[in-house]
Amino acid sequence: MKVKSEINIEIPASIFNIRRFEATVAEIIDYTYDIKGILFKLADGESIDFMAGQYVQLETSPYDKVKQKVSRAYSISSKPELQNALQLIIRYVPEGICTTWVHQHLKLGDKVFFTGPYGDFFLRDTEADIIYVAGGSGKAPIKSMLEHLAESGCRRKMTYFFGARTKKDLYLTDEMTAFENVFPDFKYVPVLSAPEPGCDWTGKTGFVMPYFKDAIRDPKNTEAYLCGSPGMINAVTKALMENGIPKEKIYYDSFG
Amino acid sequence: MKETPKEKRIRARMMPGVITLAGFVGKDKRSLSEIIAADEKELETLGRTAEEIAQRMQAFTDATFDVFDARTVIEENYEVETEVIRGKLPCPYAHGGLIRKLVTTLTNRRQNITVKWTALNIHLIKEHHFFEGKGSSFRIEPAVLVKALFD
């Protein structure tokens, strides 16, 4: 392409913050049968500056038949204040090159590389009420946001709906519920869509959408932060708008 | 049949660990053109084209792509669900563009058949008439696929 006249190219300042980092695996936690939390400690003297909600591209190392490295995007699940380390929450995807590496090959002390931070899914600095909705590994950016707000002493009204199919798909429930004692007006609401017959679940069931109404006090002054599948994002966005939340105040990170 | 240099390059991208963990050819020792020719011959016998099969698969995927956490019953016979996974993959034929990562599961109640496919499967069948090699994780036998989609 030839440029025949002067053009202005606007480059977001955040682009200049993207770097490649070296880190070491410092902790691996099995959250569920298919979700792990991995803590990466950055190399000495390194620090990462990101906004809660952003993601990094994790690079794999060669293993078994995988001879080349691949990069995959994962939301950061730890707070930005933890500058010399970060956590990712990674769900195992059968046949996935990166998730197989993480779940079956990565071990404590391994050296890894990632680039970032990327993305425009981040908390807006307002006083509006907040509805969070996530499912599966979509919990990652919301966890980062809540941990960040806990550091800054947030007083906003917040409700966090976490959708899962069965009880075995729930994780970090105690940690999320504990935020109810950190913030003056916060509620964590796990909802199971298909609880196993006979399980001892006494919480909410079905989809998350019918429960929004009770959590919204002033829809025009409410923001929503969603992370999950396109199906979840669509259904939840529709329900939030029906409850009066303006579309421009619904922010999301869709897996699709 | 001897593979052309172009076919060799494509086959190399289809090996395990390059684009997907398990690759696209399984344990099939035939050349790509032999695999494709054999499946095209079977399609002729079945009276279906790769394009109409791909179109039908795409329609089921599109109908369930943004359905939230539920199986959808289509035409009163097909139970269909699509799981979307973060990220995109290139086609091994390397003609540019990236394809969504998703898996559609369809159960034909009448025939009691369940088949699974990815968005890349649909693309490979539509554009390249490639149903993947024997033994590949996402190989779908044309006869099974036709029965699942149309009967």
Image (cartoon, rainbow, N blue to C red):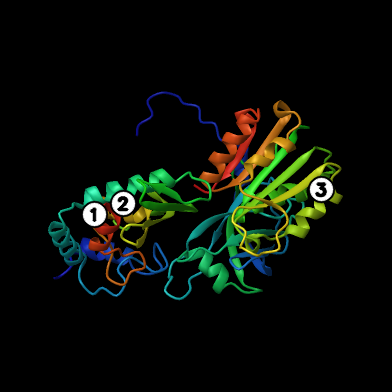
| Residue at mark 2 | B123
CA–CA distance between discs 1 and 2?
8 Å
Of all chains, the one bearing label 1 is B
Q: Residues within 10 Å of mark 1 (few under 14, many from 20)?
A: few
Please say whether residue A100 is visible from this viewpoint: yes
| Residue at mark 1 | B128
Drawn side of residue B78 relative to residue A251, left or right: left
Place of residue A73 in the rendered image (x, y in percent of width and height, measured from the top left): 55, 54
Of all chains, the one bearing label 3 is A
Q: Residues within 10 Å of mark 2 (few under 14, many from 20)?
A: some
| Residue at mark 3 | A150
Is disc 2 placed on a helix, strand or loop?
Answer: helix
Is disc 1 placed on a helix, strand or loop?
Answer: helix
Residue at 13%, 57% (x, y): give it: B44
Drawn side of residue B88 relative to residue B136, left or right: right
Q: Amino acid at mark 2?
A: His
CA–CA distance between discs 3 and 2?
46 Å
Q: Are marks 1 and 2 on the same chain?
A: yes
